[in-house]
């Protein structure tokens, strides 16, 4: 016999499909939506309904854009320097870089990282489109802004090798080193090693 | 300038309203729903839409039931003993007790626990309805199945005092003691104290 109403069981199941949400969390969310706020669940329902029709991928940079936009505003804007391109694994990495307010170049989303375990090879990444942009926009610098993980480093190395034949193209990558606010004694040895290798003269 | 499409920002905001979901988790869920599966977001959207119209509260037990049900099937069923009532704080506690498959009585949901800090007094709990059930159904045993927390114990004590005037009504509560699989040396001292007090002869 069902101990919960069907509508609630279905919601718990649907919420349980989200990454990292177990049955207990799904129950908690469902209970909250049921008990605390009808408005919130209607708002969430509408947002979900509009999600796929409201979002598309920029054909140039592969960033996520509004369905009625042609290309990413982060590319289209005249204030952004099209000759500098930060290469990121996925569209959400752009948010992190934009939050620094320090970057005035453009972005290119690879759409993943090379990972043989997950069956992702370089041919699945948006590398041909990047090469096209380099030619068309006269790109002068590619910033490899992939994660400091094995997959991120592998992908960065692969792309470096792919692009180093191109004349007058500077390839850089985000600095590795001590995170701000972290004591030297608490830094892991790999990070500390990289910080030492990449030491800067003052 | 917006770094994310509006439809996505709205979804992240709506997901961020769920209890314990921070902006990073909300982003991860939204990205998952966008990238991994359109079906899943439609399913979740529909489940949310149907939630409030599909669920109501049982007028007898205050359990959650389907909108088209009269009373809770856990009350209505002839196999359930209406003379035994387990008193729980909220509707979700029923799931936990049902999972044991050991209980054949019925339930009564209090709708909360007495908590002066949260402004919840006994008058907000479904105690009058419980008294009515005791009379109408000839209830013989009330099992106090509230949490082993301060609020749970306070509520249990209050209800015990309210009901002990009623003739021929046995009031019991869930045993406190060592959780199964836990080593004695790792049990906290309050639990161990309760286990000692409630020791059973063999």
Image (cartoon, coloured by chain):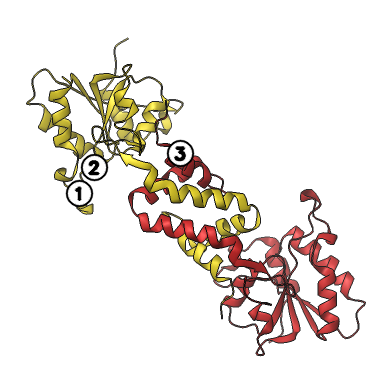
Chain colours: A yellow, B red
| Residues marked 3 and 1 touching at CB (< 8 Å) | no
How far is mark 2 from mark 3, CA to CA? Answer: 24 Å
Please give the chain letter of the residue carrying mark 3.
Answer: B
Image disc number at residue A113: 2
Note whether residue A175 is visible: no
Give the camera-side residue of A64 and B169: A64
B3 or B152: which is nearer to us?
Answer: B3
Task: Select label 3 or label 1 by which is in front.
Answer: 3
Residue picked out by circle 3: B9
Image coords of residue A159 (percent x, y): 16, 34
Residue B191 drawn at (x, y percent) = 68, 65
Q: Residue furthest right?
A: B165
Query: Left or right of A176: which side holds A183?
Result: right
Q: Dot 1 falls on which chain?
A: A
- How far apart marks 2 and 1 lie (CA) works out to 7 Å
Q: Is residue A109 left or right of residue A19?
A: left
Q: Quadrant of the C terminus of chain B?
A: bottom right
Residue linked to disc 1:
A120
Label 2 crowd bin: few (<14), some (14–19), many (20+), radius 10 Å: many
């Amino acid at each position: 016999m069902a101990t919960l109403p069907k509508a609630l069981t279905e919601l718990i199941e649907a919420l349980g499909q989200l990454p990292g949400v177990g049955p207990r969390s799904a129950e908690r969310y469902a209970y909250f939506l049921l008990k605390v706020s009808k408005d919130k669940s209607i708002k969430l329902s509408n947002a979900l309904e509009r999600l796929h029709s409201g979002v598309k991928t920029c054909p140039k940079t592969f960033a996520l854009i509004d369905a009625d936009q042609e290309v990413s505003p982060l590319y289209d804007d005249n204030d952004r320097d099209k000759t500098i391109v930060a290469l990121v694994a996925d569209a959400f990495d752009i948010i992190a870089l934009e939050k620094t307010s320090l970057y005035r170049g453009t972005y290119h989303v690879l759409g993943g990282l090379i990972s043989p375990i997950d069956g992702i090879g370089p041919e699945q990444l948006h590398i041909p489109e990047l090469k096209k942009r380099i030619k068309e926009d006269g790109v002068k610098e590619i910033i490899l802004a992939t994660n400091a993980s094995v997959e991120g480093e592998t992908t960065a190395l692969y792309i470096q090798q792919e692009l180093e034949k191109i004349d007058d193209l500077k390839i850089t990558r985000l600095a590795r080193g001590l995170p701000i606010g972290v004591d030297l004694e608490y830094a892991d040895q790999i990070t500390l090693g990289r910080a030492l290798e990449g030491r800067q003269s003052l």
